[in-house]
Amino acid sequence: MTTSHALDLQRLQQIPGWFSPLDQMLFGWLLKWQSAHGLSGDLVEMGVYKGKSAIFMGAHLTSNESLIVCDLFGRPASEEDIGAGASQFYRDRLCRQDFETNYSSFLGTLPRIVEGPSSTILEHVPASSARFVHIDAAHRYHNVCQDIASAKTMLHPDGVVVLDDYRTAHTPGVAAAVWNAVLRGDLIPLCVSESKFYGTWRPAHQCRQDLSEWLIARGLPHDVHDIDGRPLIRVSPSKK
């Protein structure tokens, strides 16, 4: 259960973005757990900003796997797609060159890059070819619903989807889409952090049990909640 590349996590923290140390630990544990249990497949990220989480994911690729990233990279987009008041932020702050410079400085190569809306991702990623999908793209309800549906199509049945901003005050559409998929659909919650929701579409009893044991061993605060008859691990940042 070793990574393909050893990352300088202190230097990674210097890249602008929202990828907490706790979520880095959860990403790392899940990606290593998948590899250790023989689950291979591509990694997909929709919405990359400056590349912090993409770099982390890229470092966990094993042989014959690829990372595919999708972002507008400052291309014109309607406020309906990315959210009222956010369009200027996206135009001013996102630059493909920044992403490529950051990524290559850590890993030496570049991932497969899709420059466009996340709604086009299925044109580039075959069905059931991915093991891990991270969604942090458009935050409107209808966009997130579409991204969740795309993730289900892309993922191997035992794959994991991660959704950012599932409980952030200014992104109620994400929360609505996530819990709608859980309570009215077949998305199975695995765990949540303060920022991200982790789920699957096939019962993951062994993964959940192993995660719980790892959290206990690491001394990471967590508790278990019942969501319509399904257990959900809530992980909190360590107070140490």
Image (tube, grey):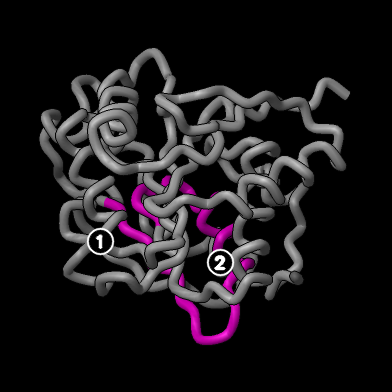
Question: Which type of secondary structure does the marked residue at label 1 adopt?
Answer: helix
Residue 87 visible (yes or no)? no
Q: Is residue 46 highlighted in magenta?
A: yes
118 is higher (above) or lower (below) than 159: above
Q: Position of residue 137 (x, y in %)?
A: 31, 42
Q: Is residue 73 left or right of residue 207?
A: left
Q: Which mark is residue 58?
A: 2
**Upstream in the sequence, badge 2 or badge 1?**
2
The region drawn magenta spans 45-71
Query: Looking at the picture, which amino acid does disc 1 mark?
Result: Thr
Above/below status of 32 relative to 24: below
Q: Secondary structure at mark 2?
A: helix
Can you say which quadrant of the picture contains the N terminus? Answer: bottom right
What residue do we see at 62% from left, 67% from top? 60
C-alpha gap between disc 2 and disc 1: 21 Å
Vertical side of 62 occupied by 103: above or below? above
Report the mark closest to the observer, 2 or 1: 1
Tell me the amino acid under the disc marked 2: Gly
Which residue is labeled 1 in the image?
Answer: 153
x and y, in percent, of residue 74 in the image: 26, 47
Residue 162 quadrant? top left
Which image quadrant for residue 140?
top left
Q: Where is 167 relative to 188, above or below?
A: above
- Residue occupying image coordinates x 59% and y 65%: 34
Give the x, y percent position of residue 29.
Answer: 68, 54
Residue 125 appears in the picture as rendered: yes
Q: Quarter of the image containing the C terminus?
A: top right
Q: Is residue 41 magenta?
A: no
User: Along the horizontal axis of the image, is 137 left or right of 168?
Assistant: left
